[in-house]
Amino acid sequence: MENEDQPSSALDARGADSGSDATARGKSDMRPPGAWHQGSKSSELSDTDLEPPSQGASEFERIKRNNDEIGEHWSARDLARVLGYTNYRNFVRVIRKAEMACQNSGQEVGNHFVDTDQMVDIGSGAKRRILDVYLSRYACYLVIQNSDPEKEIVALGQTYFAVQTQRQEQADQLAGLSEEQKRLYLRGQLVTHNKQLAETAYGAGVVQSSDFAVFQDHGYAGLYGGLRAKDIHARKGLKKSQGILDHMGSEELAANLFRATQADAKLRREEIQGKENANRAHYDVGRKVRETIAELGGTMPEELPNPPESVQQLRRREEKRLAQQRASGAPETLDTPDAHNTQKAQHSQDR
């Protein structure tokens, strides 16, 4: 059984092409924010102590709101409670940092952060106006990235909103494609990002090919509930020469793509050094992706069905179709995004 997308030597990973960072999208019809961050009175920002949160990624799903005016969004006050901030004034500082990060990323702040207010009961029939911010999914991701990293719920939130953001981006990219076309595209993305992950792992101390195989196994074990590459291979009933990634459907490929991109990001962000530390980080990323799938009610990757054809079979069919087009003199039309580059990359990796 081949260890797919593994460089023949870890040295081969150096100089690999870097994949592009995903760009999140917000609601373009969200109203521009007001200036209350700069001009509001402190009494309005720290109205009451906030209730302690319940733990778990499902809390982020539970507090999600949706309406016809701005679509899917989260209340900053709800998010503050879940993240364990007992004073909203402290959380506003986090929102300010997130807005700056949004602006620095080239996004329109008003598409992701919308100021609002509401009247709340304070007892004896009296009401008081409090300020709030409606946050897009991308805004929530930025807010959590700037939150207190010592809070366990913050790590869960980072995974949840990163998963949600990438799921939406993939949905946008793959909209209108067939299952076969999605598989070709995602398999090509995995080739690219596994090469990038190998390069980053090499910098962390995963130097030998055997080390990289162990490193990959840790990622699989986290995502597949303890199953390693050989276990997944056996569960799929594959021949020794067949690779597991080439016998995954689009949903399973997407889960593994997220594992690879987030493991790469974690190694870089935390400047992790040492084989054992890198292995642990890869396992933790896989496990968090698995936990998030469970929280969202998804199917565990090992329970997903095997597709009837391998990626190689789909690729050969596509190459035959393109050859027929060339022979007939018709302009080439590619069935998938970057299909030609995907095929070339997979050939070089799978040999």
Image (cartoon, grey):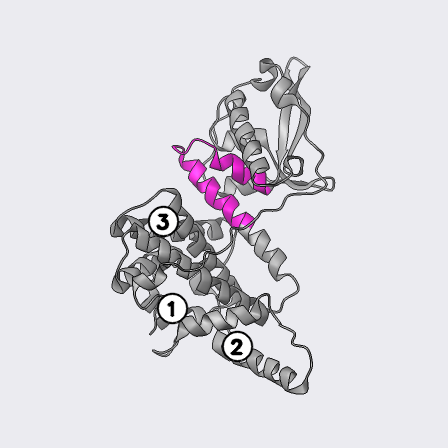
Q: Residues within 10 Å of mark 2 (few under 14, many from 20)?
A: many
Element type at mark 2: helix
Q: Which mark is residue 4?
A: 1
Q: Which mark is residue 315?
A: 2
User: Eyeballing the image, is 129 above or below 79?
Assistant: above
Q: Residue 91, how many percent across, how many down?
A: 52, 26
Q: Is residue 65 left or right of residue 81?
A: right
Element type at mark 3: helix
- Frontmost of labels 1 and 3 is 1
Q: Earlier in the sequence, mark 2 or mark 3?
A: 3
Q: Is residue 41 left or right of residue 210?
A: right
Quadrant for the N terminus, please.
bottom left
Residue 163 belongs to the span the image colors magenta? yes
User: Eyeballing the image, is 130 above or below 171?
Assistant: above
Q: Earlier in the sequence, mark 1 or mark 3?
A: 1
**Can residue 225 be seen in this snapshot?**
no
Q: Residue 17, how many percent across, how many down?
A: 45, 59
Q: Which residues are magenta?
A: 137-165
For label 3, the residue is 284
Q: Residue at x 68, y 24 (%)?
A: 118
What is the distance, in whole Å, between disc 2 and disc 3 at their CAs? 33 Å
Residue flagged by tag 1: what amino acid is it? Glu
Element type at mark 1: loop
Q: Residue at x 64, y 61 (%)?
A: 175
User: Eyeballing the image, is 322 above or below 131?
Assistant: below
What is the distance, in whole Å, between disc 2 and disc 1 at their CAs? 16 Å
Contact, CB < 8 Å: mark 2 with mark 1?
no
Residue flagged by tag 3: what amino acid is it? Asp
User: Eyeballing the image, is 253 above or below 311?
Assistant: above
The image quadrant that residue 42 belongs to is top right
